[in-house]
Amino acid sequence: MKRATFNPLRVLSLLSLMLLVSFSFYGCQDAHAEDNHDVESEEDHSGHDHAMEEVHSEEEHDDHDEDIDEHDDHESEESDDHEASEEEDGLVLSERNIEDAGIQFSIASSGSIDYHTQLLGEISMNSDQMFHIVPPVTGTVEEIRVQIGDRVEAGAVLAVLSSRDLADARGAYLSAGSSYSLAQTVHSNQQELFDADFVSEQDFLVSRQQYTEARIEYQTARQSLLNLGLSEYEINTTSSGSLLTRQELRSPIEGTVVALNLEPGEIVGDENSVLTVADLSSVWVDLAVLQTDVGSVRAGQTLTVSASESDIPEASTVLDYVSPVIDRSTRTASARAELSNPHGYWMPGLFITAHVATAESIYPVVINRDAVQSLEGEHVVFIQHEDSFETVPVELGQSNGTHVEIKHGLEQGDRYVSGGAFALKAEIVTSGLDSHAGHGH
């Protein structure tokens, strides 16, 4: 075995390497410790600040939550108070809203309810105020001055004819007038001569007879012209010439031309009407009464007339006539009433519906039909209590188109909303209020 020898250089190298390793090891430890110290310091500081911030944030959040809770509580209290007010006091409206809604009040009282029978009918012209114009002579139409629908005055010229018959009648009138004038002069002279004893009595009587006959002939010719439709002025201004054939057809009344049956150049005679003028300020209401209603419909009953699907206002009149005979084909009886028509709304030919008041009963409490509204299947009427509107449940009885009997819910003397009730109902529905809010009892 070879024995190892001592080498100083090698020992020195090993010692140097050991020192270097030791130095590196402890230096890294110190640096690591310092780094850890710095990190821990920063973490401690950062943690402290973050904790402080969290504490502060939580305090602010708590304060904010408290504010929100207080605000919510306040709003909740206000909402509860508001809802309670609506439930307890009903619907509150300002004076302007009340006026805009057209709310009106009435007092519940006793009243009558009429029962009506419905009849169907038609507007026709009043025959008592309708005039058919028939030419008094045969002639040729020279001029037409009106059309159907024209308003005319009494005496207005509607058409002009040229008539040979009229010319003959005017000629006879002129001849009779001339003979009458001559006979009158002769008789006057004979009267003077007879009084002076210059002529005999026989000659005087002959002149008087001729005078009388001439006067009769003249009056007859004049009456013939009057019968032909000539006026006094036209007769007095009659003279020879082309005007002898002129025949004017004039309106006998103030009214409306409703029929026109002639053309220019047409020959018309005295058999048929060529013009019709009617006074439409009043018309007839012709009705058909079913045999089941004949027993209850009588002359003298009040009649309300309306035209469906039109804006013509309703009109009232009295039934004048009910036929005592049932028509075999229609199984109805005819009835008639005269209706005032100053504005011309009720045109002949217009179909109408009429309601006849056939019975009447008196009830303790009767109110306007429009005052009753339906809320959630319940009939209610609105009343005003202090500053709010409340609903009152009512039990209905007999009714017609305008009024209704109240059996329970209102008493005589109660003040209720008679106009604008629908607007109050709409306000309750749209605002989401309970329909029983503010129920009056």
Image (cartoon, rainbow, N blue to C red):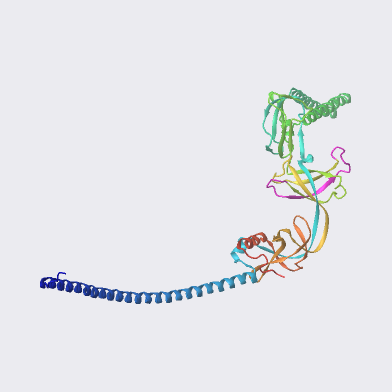
Q: Relative to residue 42, is residue 176 depicted above or below? A: above
Q: Relative to residue 24, is residue 419 depicted above or below? A: above
- Check residue 321 for magenta coloring: yes
- Check residue 294 for magenta coloring: no
Predominant SS of the magenta segment: loop
| Visible residue check, residue 436 | yes
Horizontal relation, residue 386 to residue 72: left or right: right
User: Which residues are the magenta region?
Assistant: 307-330
Q: In which quarter of the image is the N terminus?
A: bottom left
Q: Quadrant of the C terminus?
A: bottom right
Horizontal relation, residue 40 to residue 10: left or right: right
Quadrant of the rendered structure where residue 26 is? bottom left
Quadrant of the rendered structure where residue 399 is? bottom right
Q: Residue at x 68, y 25 (%)?
A: 264
Residue 65: x and y in percent read: 47, 74
Q: Nearer the viewer, residue 377 or 319?
A: 377
Q: Nearer the viewer, residue 422 or 239?
A: 422
Q: Which of 282 and 330 is in front in this view?
A: 330
Q: Relative to residue 261, is residue 112 depicted above or below? A: below
Residue 166: x and y in percent read: 75, 25
Q: Which of 435 and 412 is in front in this view?
A: 435
Residue 139: x and y in percent read: 73, 24
Q: Which residue is drawn at 30% across and 76% down?
A: 41
Residue 36: x and y in percent read: 28, 74
